[in-house]
Amino acid sequence: MAEMIKSFRPYVTWANARGAWPDMIFSTRVRFARNLVGFPFPNRAEPRQLAEIRRQAMAAARDSGLFARGHFLKLEALGPLDKRFLVERHHVSHALAATVLAAGAAVSNDEDLSVMVNEEDHLRLQCLHSGFAIEGAFKAALKLDEALGRALPFAYGSRFGFLTACPTNTGTGMRVSCLAHLPALTRLGQMPQVLESLSHLGVTARGIYGEGTMVLGDFYQISNATCLGRTEEEFCQNIDRVIRNLIRQEIAAREALLKSPLKLRTEDAVYRALGLLRHARTLSYEEFMQNVSLVRMGAAMGWNMGHDFSTFNQVTLLMQPAHIQAAAGRELDPAERDAFRAELLRKKLA
Amino acid sequence: MLCEECRKQNAAVFLKLAVNNKVKELHLCPACAAKKGMSFGLESGAFNISDIVGNMSGYFKDFLPPERKTLRCGACGLKYSEFKESGRLGCPDCYAGFEPQLTELMARIHGSALHTGRAYADAPELKLSKAETARRLAELRAELRDAVTREDFEGAARLRDALKRLEGRRG
């Protein structure tokens, strides 16, 4: 089993359910896209330029003091399971994990901060906080941005702001996102209208691991759709407003599910899901996500699910494929994984 | 239910994606699902979205004004036509090279073409140590020799400019 995974914590603070609205907002993320002056963007850079960019970025991260006892990773040195683990921890994107040349990542000791090197842009800096925490995550990400910006010359122009490989990120280079859990709206079949209304508010919804990923367990990543023409604070305020509104809509949807004639069906679905999670002998990740979604909703409705959101968040993190293999201490094929997942979950929910 | 892709096999894989703020549902047979390029396997949640909504670059193509074919970035050499194809710029200097076109594009994507967020004032003046400068100069000279040997004169001109800039900084 890979040494890298062993050096990571078994569990992370950004999933501890201690932030605001833990029943609906799993975590909040703020990221900045940054590039260095004097180098082509990664898609057009030479191998040795990519290596040089990574050297400078890693040195700047180390010198910032924000990554004390943290992780400094060269992705070509890692196996597929390690990379998959980093994706599941939201430190590395699928795109970076698939990058062949000079891809890197720095992750802080508490795993709140990370830097991806040589993905679409030279640097992607991010901060992850627990629950609904836009202001806190923004301030911490900004601190990281300023520390690295003092050490490295960022590509910037007064007209377009921070210059990025894709014009959709130009300007602030900032994306603020909340991982929102919206099971009641989904159950009522209202998500299509909700998503449609979001597009008029300058906001985008994506799947659980970001761009181009599936919607699993009714989790949606909600983020600003544009990056230019408003201040960072204005973009944050807009997302803040949209999320608060979504929270209100989800609460209203829960209330609708609790009124007859839907109440009995809702209750039945939730307790069946709880039974399945507690007693299944083999459980795929998707099936886990579908059912934990209902159980989380039950807990949010005030029913006794035997555990609180900190446990549900923890198992949501731990049931992912690479985490399951990390817990088993060895690589497992999908069938073995499903059996081990069911066994581990029974222990966690006992 | 038949697979939506091949319309021959029975659909066994059910996928739900959020694309352009719409929930899209797909029913595929295992073979077609595998062909869609799920590099980490189904349970990872990764999916090649361009297969479903068409390439993102189409988005840029429709938005961008047509340009004379020869327009290219003076620094990295990226052709404007290449940018239209890929939707990705080549280097920070492309923003100056394609400024009028990008101004129009930015207004369409972001609803504005002017940055009003944080200014980046305390940029370090690319301060390089003597050793670092010497190393980069040596690298550039080697690349220049290569370019001349290859008879890549455009590349050589760019490298010569870069050399001048770096030498100027040292002086």
Image: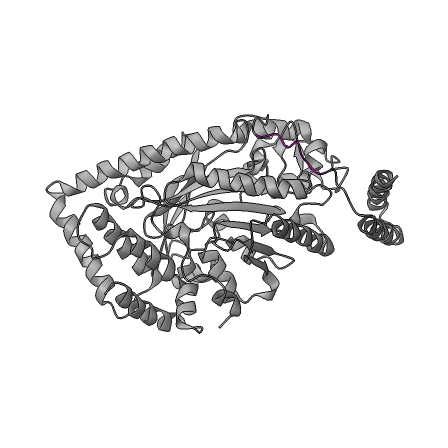
- Dividing the picture into quadrants, the one containing residue A193 is top left
Image coords of residue A257 (percent x, y): 18, 42
Q: Is residue A106 left or right of residue A317?
A: right
The answer to whether residue B1 shows anywhere in this view is no
Residue in the image at 50% along x and 41% along y: A140
Residue in the image at 55% along x and 25% along y: B112
- From the image, give the main secondary structure of the stretch colored magenta: loop
Residue in the image at 27% along x and 35% along y: A249
The answer to whether residue A267 shows anywhere in this view is yes
State the extent of the magenta-drawn residues as a range: B118-124
Instruction: Tally the marks.
Output: 0
Residue in the image at 34% along x and 47% along y: A18
Q: Quadrant of the N terminus of chain B?
A: bottom left
- Dividing the picture into quadrants, the one containing residue A325 is bottom left
A73 in relation to A64, above or below: below
Image coords of residue A78 (percent x, y): 56, 65
Q: Is residue B171 left or right of residue A287?
A: right
* Residue A303 or residue A20, whichever sits in front: A20
A188 in relation to A117, above or below: above
Does the magenta run of residues contain A122? Answer: no
Does the magenta run of residues contain B119? Answer: yes
Q: Quadrant of the C terminus of chain B?
A: top right
Image coords of residue A190 (percent x, y): 27, 39
- Dividing the picture into quadrants, the one containing residue A153 is top right
Image coords of residue B50 (percent x, y): 50, 48
